[in-house]
Amino acid sequence: MVQSHQPSQRLPPGSDLDEYLSSRGINLRNRNNTSLTRQDLLPHFRRKTVCILSCNACRTTVCQRGMKAILLADTRVELYSTDSTPFGVEHVGLEYSTNNCLCKIKDVACLNCGNILGYNVTSACVSCLTACNNGHYWMLYSTSVIASVRIDPKGTT
């Protein structure tokens, strides 16, 4: 199912995003910009396999907390997502938006070899912030990384 995230409303001018979300009972990120605690996540997200992700081109490990995901705008695109900043990667190119929402995103590449690994949602739009999400703003293409299971859905390695 393809889901379009066209914003139904815009944040009122001069409003603080944290205030806006809090007024609606939404607390997705804390003041340190870290993700929700495990207990705060929906049960569906707690049962997902956690993977170690490495660059497909040079085999450099870039993430210890990847989870398999699909692109909402095109469910044929498989990704890995994470809530922690991958290591050994850097933003490249200019910030851009998609046709599906007003999020700002920027591509990320492996610092060791330059391979484009995916993208980072640098500024999520109100529509996406208020939709069900797991706090993962780093997306790595399944074709650009190699995944190995770190923790399976039962919590074992």
Image (spheres, rainbow, N blue to C red):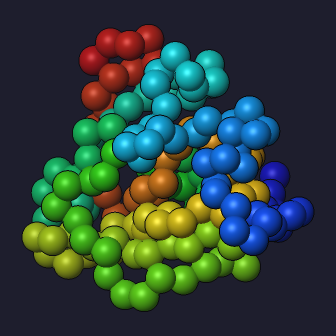
Quadrant occupied by the C terminus: top left
In terms of depth relative to the viewer, which is nearer, 15 or 89? 15
Q: Residue furthest front?
A: 14
Drawn side of residue 69 relative to residue 141, left or right: right
Residue 117 showing in the rendered view:
yes
Question: x, y percentage for residue 133?
Answer: 63, 42
- State the residue at coordinates (31%, 75%): 91
Q: Front-most of 123 and 149?
A: 123
Q: Position of residue 43 (x, y in %)?
A: 62, 19
Question: Residue 7 versus residue 12: which sits nearer the camera?
Answer: 12
Q: Quadrant of residue 93?
A: bottom left
At horizontal 43% and vertical 56% (from top left) the residue drawn is: 138
Name the residue located 48 percent from the left edge and 54 percent from the top edge. Answer: 137
- The location of residue 34, given as percent across then percent down, is 40, 41
Asked if residue 155 is positioned above or below residue 96 in the image, the reply reads above
Please indicate whether residue 79 sits to the left or right of residue 76 in the image: left
- Is residue 10 positioned above or below 98 on the image? above
Q: Residue furthest right?
A: 8
Q: Is residue 57 visible?
A: no
Q: Position of residue 148 (x, y in %)?
A: 28, 38
On screen, residue 125 versus residue 157, left or right, reads: right
Left or right, 2 with respect to 35, comes to right
